[in-house]
Image (cartoon, helix red, strand yellow):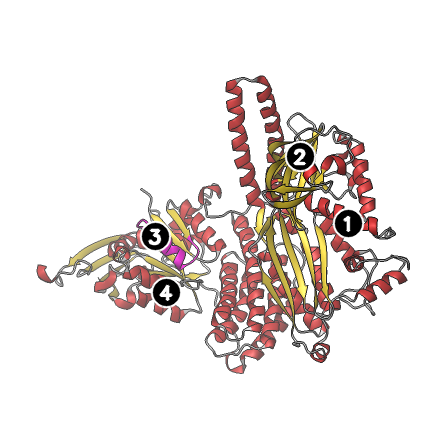
Amino acid sequence: MPKTILTVDDSASVRQMVRFTLTEAGYNVIEASDGQDALAKLTAPVNLVITDLNMPCLDGIGLIRCLRANPACKGVPIIMLTTESQEAKKQEGRAAGATGWIVKPFTAQQLVAVVKKVIG
Amino acid sequence: MMDAFQAGFFDEARELLAELELALLEMDDKRGDPEIIGRAFRALHTIKGSGAMFGFEQIAGFTHHLESAFDRVRNGQLDVSSSLTNLALAASDQIKAMLEEAAGRGTADPARSDEILRSVSELMGPSDAPAQRASSAPAPAGGEGGPVREWRIHFRPSPDVLVNGTNPLLLLRELREFGDLKVTVDTSAIPPLQDIAPERCYLAWDMTLATEAPRDAIRDVFIFVEDDSELIIEAFGEAVGEAAGDRPEAKPSAAARAPSRSAPAKSAGAGQAAASIRVAAGKLDQLVNLVGELVTVQARLSEAAARSNDGTILDIAEAVERLTSELRENSMSIRMLPLRATFERFRRLVHDLGVELGKDVELTVEGAETELDKTVIDQLNDPLVHLIRNSMDHGIETPEARRAAGKHPTARIHLSALHSGANVLIRVSDDGRGLDAEKVRARALEQGLIDVSSRLSEPEVYSLIFEPGFSTAREVTDVSGRGVGMDVVRRNVEALHGSIELASRPGEGLTVTLRLPLTLAIIDGLLVRVGDAHFVLPLANSLECVELTGEDIQAAHGNRIANVRGELIPYIRLSEYFQMNTARPDREQIMVVETEHGLYGFVVDQVLGDHQTVIKNLGRLCRNVQVVSGATILGNGTVALILDPHRLVQNVLQTASETKRPGVSALRGAGQRSTADQHLHSKGTQDLCYVK
């Protein structure tokens, strides 16, 4: 049973890259374009959420808070995508309950390494 | 594979730039709206992030500075000013140029980038010039070389580690990949059973690890948790082996192993069952063409099936008809696009022209969600640009002149779109000075477009501005007035089987209405018969079908008016209109059709039923025929003409008014047109030479 990963990003090209990389690595990938969309698509449990921080509607921090407040998603690993200029955001994300982070720009190898680290 | 990602990035970046431009222009209007500033920031942020991801460091670096500026705006540290907006628009153009350069089209001037960045840092103030971005990214794990050493690791995660989604066992497993790992669990912190909270982690681990990896690589394993955990990593003992290069069985590190997992890139298809996909427009056109052919063949099948009278074949033919019709609707809907993108593009045009002409103009948009066939939208851009330019240049006055005329100094151009039957009406209105009928007339006389004896109604005078070479501009400006433009508008619109109407309120403004068909490919039609000829009327405008008996005709005392449930509806008998010498049957049928002139009836011998109509263009010979919008091929291979009810009614009304008021031959009048129509019919509807 492949593990399911939800990738949340308002950039279609980043989603495409994440999806391609993780599908190749043997994961099942769901895409969402922002926090709202992600919540709507979380009808079944997922093994990992990878979310951008800057998004319309509901941003990454808001999404992490929503997920942590939901008993069903409490222990789900959440990785946030940050940029090197967003140290404050990263801390905010950690405080909200993010599991880890990847700094953009990242390579396919880095992405797979982090995903493996968090969900095996 | 990277190329496909890059192509995706180019598409996305172009959309983001359009979004950025839009936000910037709106920001200019509504300063300090955090929602709009947020949108501009996000667009920049995504261009930067994705640009760096897909190897466009230069674009990312350039965008970064702009993003920093907007981050400050967002945090209230920098005010929105028109110099910022203009700078950002210039930067947006520069990013566009850099994108084109990266895509192998054209070149971007690096000096221009520097110039823009200098202005950005000036705007941001000297205290905090945009810092050079660091492009390093942390490698999560790995390390090579160095002698194998033994490490003692103590790890006590925070009790909340599980809730935050970290599985400590995975971290231990990751450590094991570095080398030989021995683990001892420290259970001393586990409380009595009644105090245990199931979501908390009470365990700690003491480990020894023999690896050639450096300390930093080991620490990186705990990168996500080290801030909240007790973590001690110390080296002890001596090196237990030689350098890694001498150990043939040296284990690869996690980072070194990862690429081999993701390397076999087979096909992009597997991973792209996304919510939407991008398809080349040419493929869609091909699909629609094929569906058109299929519809024609299906009509033949139905016809043949009806003749054979074989139940099985009839069944199959019906199923095929149903499926074809669904397929047609589906494939047509794929080509439908909202007008939004087209409309929004004009904001920039209006902004730039306003600066150039020194006029203050606000563009408002309505009905941007209206959908139109992509091929129609593609050809709509030029006419709309001409109309807007014309409004900006000729219609709208300078702010001073507006004030003198008692108007608001900021002029308005309103773009709107709405559905009307099988058509879409697109309006461009301005609140400028409008058209001066006298001036237009004088100018037309001067240019020999009309002669002195011509007596023209106001709409006829206005339509003169669409004649080739016509211009009332006193001097030629950069924007318009070179005598090309409005005739191009009419040509383009007519090529789309559309029409143009003008409504001018002198001193108050001008409204130009473009009436365009929803699609140029396949429509739902109603097949009718007159004598032995077939015609198709667009179903979208057809309301009902009633009988017209001899008694009804007598009751109207020679007027061509039918009484449909108490409502009087004027009608046009097609056999008369086309001067066909057919015997009038006892019972005729009236198709009641909604036109822009109200309800009209079209009298035919028989209504045959609905028909999926694949529109074929009439050849060049018939380009002046206005009442026929095309032709279609029926199941038996014969040709039916597709009528344009709106034009037909207009033509009849015009002919009627011209018989009272002769001598307007200088205009492209209806007399001329109806001759062409009759000529067309006298050649016979089955004459295939007219059909491309």
Residue B471 horizontal side relative to residue B301, left or right: right
Which is more N-terminal, label 4 or label 3?
Answer: 3
Residue A21 horizontal/vertical position (percent): 43, 49
Disc 3 chain ID: A
Label 4 sits on a secondary structure element that is helix
| x then y, percent, for residue B546 | 61, 37
Numbered mark located on residue B685 in the image? none
Q: Are marks 2 and 4 in contact (CB under 8 Å)?
A: no
Front one among B335 and B275: B335
Q: Does the rendering let one see residue B653? A: yes
Q: Which residue is mark 1?
A: B654
Relative horizontal placement of residue B323, taking residue B241 as reference (left or right): right
A120 and B259: which is toward the camera: A120
Residue assigned mark 3 = A42
- CA gap, disc 3 to disc 2? 69 Å
Mark 3, Cα crowd under 10 Å, few <14 / some 14-19 / many 20+, is: some
Q: Mark 3 and 4 residues: CB-CB less than 8 Å, in contact?
A: no
Chain letter of disc 1 in the image: B
